[in-house]
Image (cartoon, rainbow, N blue to C red):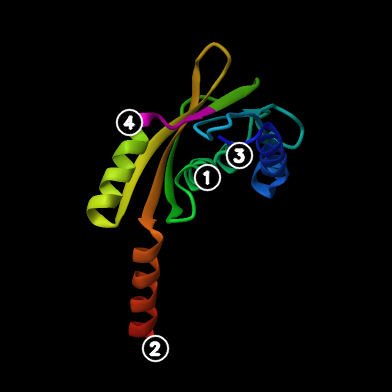
Amino acid sequence: MRSKFYVWFYRLVLNCMPCIWGGGGKVIVLTPDFRRLVVRLRLKIRTMNIMGTIFGGSMYASTDPMFMIMLMEILGKDYVVWDKGCTIRFKRPAKKNIFCEFLITDEMLEKVKSEVASNNETTFTWTVAYKNKDGVVYCEFDKVLYVATKSFYEKKLAARRAKNS
């Protein structure tokens, strides 16, 4: 577990990232174990599109690195984590505050660790959604992530560089 100051400072740094601040999002919850993170996105002049609803780019930008950052903190320096892709499904226009809750359960984490232990690397997809306070879904994201042991990843990169030189 990290200290309250560490978590507070980390949340502050996240909120200053261009994808969060620039997109109009705000990390409002970050638990000390980095297993739960909540982003709020408000309809404001800088998040509003020509139709008067929240811009889809703001929705995506404010969710982009979250699972990757959470996993990096949880797994530690012996692992490499990359955000590889995302499929977005817009369900309805958002004209009010929406929230995106990122959760990493024990089961999710155990599956990642066991697949990496077996194969040295894994790619998987986790789904997250922007919802209003009543639970109505406005947008869903299928986030594709890659995790590998650091030693395996470094060998893989070295082999790739040697092949390309």
Quickly name the residue at label 4.
Answer: 107
Nearer to us in this view, 148 or 94: 148
96 w.r.t. 41: above or below? above
Residue 123 x/y as whole percent: 32, 50
> Mark 1 or 4 closer to N-term?
1
Nearest to viewer (mark 2 / mark 4):
4
Furthest toward the right, the residue is 45
Comes first in the chain, label 3 or label 2: 3
Q: Which residue is mark 1?
A: 73
Q: What is the three-letter code of the residue carrying label 3? A: Ser
The stretch of residues the image draws in magenta is: 101-107
Q: Nearer the viewer, mark 2 or mark 1?
A: 1
Local secondary structure at mark 2:
loop
* Residue where numbered disc 2 is placed: 165
**Magenta region includes residue 102:** yes
The residue that label 3 is drawn on is 62
The quadrant of the rendering that contains the C terminus is: bottom left
Q: What kind of residue is marked 4?
A: Glu
Report crowding for label 1: few under 14, some 14 to 19, many 20 or more residues within 10 A (C-alpha): some
Distance, label 3 to label 1, CA atoms, is 19 Å
**Location of residue 43 in the rendering, given as x and y in whole percent from the top left corner:** 70, 27
- Of discs 3 and 1, which sits in the foreground? 1
